[in-house]
Image (cartoon, helix red, strand yellow):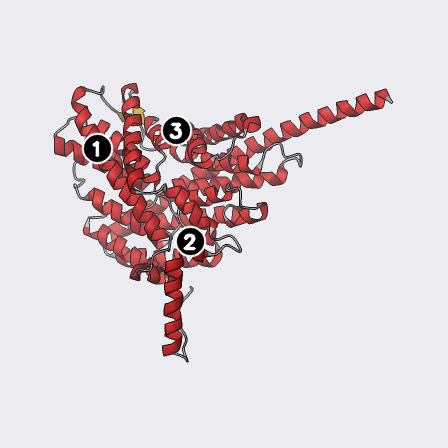
């Protein structure tokens, strides 16, 4: 009897160890797959944007036709087949991590189907020349792939679905920017809502491993390469403070505008148009983006990556109004409802703002101010100062900038909080309204009541044809 109990205990312990190693192997294998998928996604978007610029060079007027038609088609396909893929992707992952979301409902926000849809439709957005980034989509793609690992894990639940989603989403940031440390900080600051002490080491290892896939495939340089800056001198204090305040105001306004536009809670003419005819509205946004781009010789098309690199290289030709027009096209792109993120355009806007402050003050440390502007605007727009600081820190060749980058991110984020609620947290709340049984009237009583009243009026005045509301 004693021997049978002892043998059973040994077998139980050995099976536990086997399950532990199996869990580690599955998670790390999926981390490699996630990292490679994000790298491939990055290369696809670069190719797509290159094709758009080739088309524009062949016919300057082509964006006026191609961009609005593509925007309308992307939104129609998104709403018809993969509605959960619309927008950035970060709010969807945050919603999937919410405790009130049941296991069976997570497919509304993350899945392999949504990951594939996000990959294809966001790439089409680049092919259309829209002002978007691939980092937000990378988070949803990464979370969708990593979440699929649950099918291969032992039933003992050594790694939770929460941990898989955090690891996948953060791996998307790590691989997209070639900055594994930023991926870890993004997981802590934005995604994680409860401690995973038992498997935190495995989750961090998965994030870093996915980031290393990006490094191995794309070289040991971050998104914009290495930003070479001089020592932080005393004459940089006042321009840096002015820049941090400007980034906080601009980023807070951007965040507030995004929440106002994407929430669907207002009853102004444009919000009603967007609710009733989303595809036509998307085409109109695409036309405005095309008009702005054509009027500015194409500088606002795409993520702004090439123009940020040009500013860092000291090349002339970037007008002071670039900040305003990139701000507008990024907002219009998000408002249209296409799958796409705002990280890269935010870095471009902030970098351009830093370049303008350098020109305004006559300060020679232009690369330093560009780096500070990137940090400040991204921190203000997302209200994730630590993630913004680390993303740019890993691009800067110079330890003297570390404290100034951190200070700029904290100041800009603090100013933004006065103007706006946290962007991704608020958009995640809007995503939770998609849960079955949840009434959108709770979130937007005035808008829904007004729309219902208007529909009732239409029924009275047009009894034969009805309200004529399109839900395409």
Looking at the rendering, which quadrant does residue 364 occupy? top left
The vertical placement of 205 against 127, above or below, is above
| The label number, if any, that marks residue 219 in the structure image | 3
Which residue is at 25% across, 35% downward?
Answer: 351
The vertical placement of 129 against 281, above or below, is above
Question: Quick one: 112 or 388, which is closer to the camera?
Answer: 388
Quick check: 269 left or right of 356? Answer: right
Binning the other alpha carbons within 10 Å of mark 1 as few (below 14), some (14 to 19) or many (20 upward) gives: many
Residue 46 in percent (x, y) is at: 36, 42
Q: Which residue is mark 1?
A: 243
> In what element is the residue under mark 2?
helix
Q: Quick one: which residue is furthest to the bottom in this view?
A: 464
Q: Which residue is mark 2?
A: 443
> In what element is the residue under mark 3?
loop
Which residue is at 46% across, 41% downward?
Answer: 94
Task: Answer with mark 3 or mark 2, whichever residue precedes in sequence.
Answer: 3
Question: Quick one: 367 or 193, which is closer to the camera?
Answer: 193
């Amino acid at each position: 009897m004693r021997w049978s109990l002892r043998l059973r205990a040994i077998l139980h312990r050995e099976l536990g160890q086997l399950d532990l190693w199996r869990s580690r192997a599955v998670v790390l294998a999926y981390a490699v797959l996630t990292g490679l998928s994000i790298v491939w996604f990055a290369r696809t978007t670069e190719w797509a944007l290159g094709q758009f610029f080739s088309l524009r060079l062949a016919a300057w007027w082509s964006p006026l036709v191609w961009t609005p038609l593509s925007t309308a088609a992307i939104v129609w396909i998104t709403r018809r087949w993969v509605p959960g893929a619309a927008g950035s992707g970060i709010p969807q992952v945050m919603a999937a991590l919410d405790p009130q979301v049941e296991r069976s409902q997570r497919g509304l926000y993350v899945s392999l189907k949504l990951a594939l849809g996000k990959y294809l439709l966001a790439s089409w957005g680049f092919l259309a020349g829209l002002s978007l980034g691939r980092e937000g989509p990378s988070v949803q793609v990464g979370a969708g792939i990593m979440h699929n690992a649950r099918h291969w894990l032992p039933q003992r639940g050594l790694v939770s679905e929460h941990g898989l989603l955090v690891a996948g989403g953060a791996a998307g940031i790590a691989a997209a920017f070639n900055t594994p440390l930023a991926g870890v900080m993004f997981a802590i600051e934005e995604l994680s809502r409860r401690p995973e002490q038992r498997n935190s080491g495995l989750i961090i290892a998965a994030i870093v491993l996915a980031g290393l896939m990006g490094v191995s495939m794309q070289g040991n340089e971050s998104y914009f390469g290495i930003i070479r800056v001089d020592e932080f001198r005393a004459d940089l204090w006042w321009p840096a403070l002015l820049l941090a305040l400007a980034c906080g105001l601009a980023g807070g306004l951007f965040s507030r505008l995004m929440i106002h536009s994407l929430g669907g809670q207002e009853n102004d003419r444009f919000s009603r148009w967007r609710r009733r005819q989303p595809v036509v509205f998307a085409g109109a946004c695409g036309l405005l983006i095309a008009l702005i781009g054509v009027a500015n010789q194409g500088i606002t098309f795409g993520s702004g990556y090439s123009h940020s690199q040009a500013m860092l290289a000291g090349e002339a030709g970037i007008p002071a109004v670039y900040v305003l027009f990139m701000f507008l096209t990024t907002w219009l792109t998000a408002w249209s409802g296409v799958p796409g993120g705002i990280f890269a355009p935010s870095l471009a806007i902030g970098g351009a703002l830093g370049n303008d402050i350098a020109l305004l003050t006559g300060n020679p440390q232009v690369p330093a101010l560009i780096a500070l502007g990137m940090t400040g605007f991204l921190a203000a727009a997302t209200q994730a100062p630590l993630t913004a600081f680390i993303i740019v820190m890993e691009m800067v060749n110079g330890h003297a900038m570390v404290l100034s980058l951190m200070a700029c991110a904290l100041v800009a984020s603090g100013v933004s909080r006065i103007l706006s609620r946290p962007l991704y947290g608020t958009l995640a709340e809007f995503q939770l309204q998609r849960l079955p049984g949840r009434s959108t009237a709770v979130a937007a009583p005035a808008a829904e009541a007004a729309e219902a009243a208007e529909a009732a009026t239409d029924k009275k005045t047009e009894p034969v044809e009805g309200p004529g509301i399109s839900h395409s």
